[in-house]
Structure formats: structure tokens, C-alpha cells
């Protein structure tokens, strides 16, 4: 399995914010989001290292955290993710999978953390082939429906401008099955001050809809740093 880093940190987003976890960051992604903050694990990938699934589990055991987060890149494009989640489940780890929801795999997890990509993810200044691939892949409603039907889930939408809110409502209407209290709106930011400013109006909107505002707390705790 191709991995770029394995590290310990606190979960900064969503339902289990603040929980100390082992993060396994896989290499590769089928999207090219303009706001990506982990390009070293996606299209500008350092390619990471090949690790046997058993070795990844062994490293998780050494870090000794009961929560394990599989993130990327996009962990769902690697078939070995199935075996990894099964081995972690056998050892009673609590597993979160962070995904854009564009690919389905029959995995085992305790939280399917899905971040559907809105039009604000479309990259600028890239070749037409990359732009076409991103737009073709970014919205896979049927895959998301299947994932949330099979797992406890949260939906995290990255919000930049107020007009993104209408697109989120249209997406949720088309999806048709999401509970409002499982919908998280996350300010687009790599700076804590910018994030907090956006969180004011995003939070007000969430209160009226039963959603949750989702600051990226790792920016507050560590700044915009790798390995956090």
C-alpha cells in the first residue's frame, strides 16, 4: 500500500474533534482540487513508500492510539484499504476513513467522513484534460449514497463564499438521505484568522438549518503545518 506518512495528532475536524489519533496518509488522488492542502500526497505526490498492510497495522500498534484515521490523498482508490480496515477492526481500533466519496469500496469503519467537492474545488490554470477529469470525478452521488447507507457518516462541505450554500442545498436535495446533524460546513482557509471570520456567518447559517459549523482546529492548534 502506498503511504506518504504515518503520524500521531489530534483530529481537528468533525465528530471526533480533539481525539488523539494515528493518521495514515495514503498517496494519490483522483481529483485535483484547487484548494488542496496536501498536494504532496496527491498530484504533486512524493510517491511515498510501499508498505505491507501488516506493517501499517504494526506502526499503529506502536503509536498506541485507539483511533486511526485513513486519509490522503484519497485512500479509497487503493484496494488495500479494504484489508487494512479489516485488520484494524479485528484489533478493535476505531477507524475513520476520510474520502471525497467518489469511489466505493467494501471497507469496515466506524466513521465514513465524506467531503463532497463543490464547484469551488475546480482548479484554475490547469490543462484541459486535468480540468475535465476533476469535473467528471468530483460528484458521484450514487457512491456517496451507498457509503452513507452502510456506515456511520458525516458530510463535510468546504465553504468559501455565501453562494456555496445554495450549491450545498442542491446537493443535499439530490442526495436525499442525509440527516442535518451529520452535515458539517467547513470554512475554506489555511489561516486561523480567515477561518474564524468565515465561521461567523457559516455558523449562523448552520444554526438555522440544523447543520454543524466545522472549524479546522488543527490550524488553531498547530498552524498550517504538515503532519498535523
Image: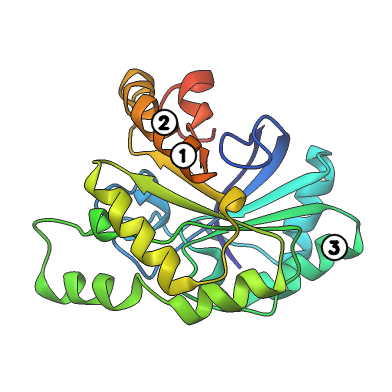
Which residue is located at x 76 percent, y 48 percent? Answer: 59
Name the secondary structure under disc 2: helix
The quadrant of the image that shows the N terminus is bottom right
Mark drawn on residue 195: none
Mark drawn on residue 89: 3
- Is 42 situated above or below 68? below
Give whichever of 77, 96 is nearer the camera. 96
Nearest to viewer (mark 1 / mark 3): 1
Which residue is located at x 32 percent, y 60 percent? Answer: 43
User: Does residue 174 appear to the left or right of 218 in the view shown?
Assistant: left
- Is 149 situated above or below 28? below
Q: Which residue is mark 1?
A: 208
Which residue is located at x 62 percent, y 79 percent? Answer: 105
Q: CA distance from mark 2 to mark 3?
A: 38 Å
Residue 156 percent location from the top left of the image: 49, 51
Crowd band around label 2 with a 10 angstrom C-alpha radius: few (<14), some (14–19), many (20+):
few
Name the secondary structure under disc 3: helix
Q: Earlier in the sequence, mark 2 or mark 3?
A: 3
Name the secondary structure under disc 1: helix
Q: Which residue is mark 2?
A: 204
Q: CA distance from mark 1 to mark 2?
A: 7 Å
Q: Earlier in the sequence, mark 1 or mark 3?
A: 3
User: Residue lying furthest front in this view?
Assistant: 208
Residue 225 percent location from the top left of the image: 44, 29
Render colour scheme: rainbow
Amino acid at each position: 500500500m502506498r503511504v506518504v506518512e504515518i503520524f500521531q495528532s489530534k483530529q481537528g475536524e468533525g465528530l471526533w474533534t480533539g481525539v488523539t489519533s494515528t493518521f495514515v496518509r495514503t498517496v494519490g488522488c483522483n481529483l485535483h482540487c484547487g484548494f488542496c492542502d496536501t498536494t504532496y500526497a496527491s498530484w504533486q505526490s512524493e510517491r511515498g513508500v510501499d508498505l505491507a498492510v501488516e506493517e501499517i497495522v504494526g506502526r499503529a500498534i506502536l503509536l498506541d492510539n485507539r483511533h486511526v484515521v485513513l486519509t490522503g490523498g484519497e485512500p479509497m482508490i487503493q484496494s488495500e484499504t479494504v484489508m487494512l480496515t479489516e485488520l484494524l477492526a479485528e484489533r478493535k481500533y476505531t477507524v475513520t476513513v476520510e474520502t471525497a466519496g467518489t469511489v466505493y469500496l467494501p471497507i469496515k469503519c466506524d466513521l465514513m467522513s465524506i467531503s463532497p467537492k463543490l464547484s469551488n474545488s475546480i482548479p484554475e490554470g490547469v490543462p484541459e484534460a486535468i480540468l475535465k477529469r476533476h469535473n467528471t470525478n468530483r460528484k458521484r452521488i450514487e457512491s456517496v449514497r451507498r457509503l452513507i447507507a452502510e456506515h456511520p457518516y458525516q458530510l463535510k462541505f468546504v465553504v468559501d463564499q455565501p453562494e456555496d450554500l445554495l450549491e450545498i442545498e442542491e446537493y443535499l436535495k439530490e442526495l436525499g438521505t442525509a440527516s442535518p446533524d451529520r452535515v458539517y460546513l467547513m470554512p475554506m482557509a489555511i489561516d486561523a484568522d480567515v477561518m474564524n471570520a468565515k465561521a461567523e456567518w457559516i455558523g449562523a447559517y448552520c444554526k438555522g438549518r440544523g447543520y454543524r459549523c466545522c472549524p479546522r482546529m488543527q490550524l488553531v492548534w498547530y498552524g498550517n503545518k504538515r503532519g498535523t
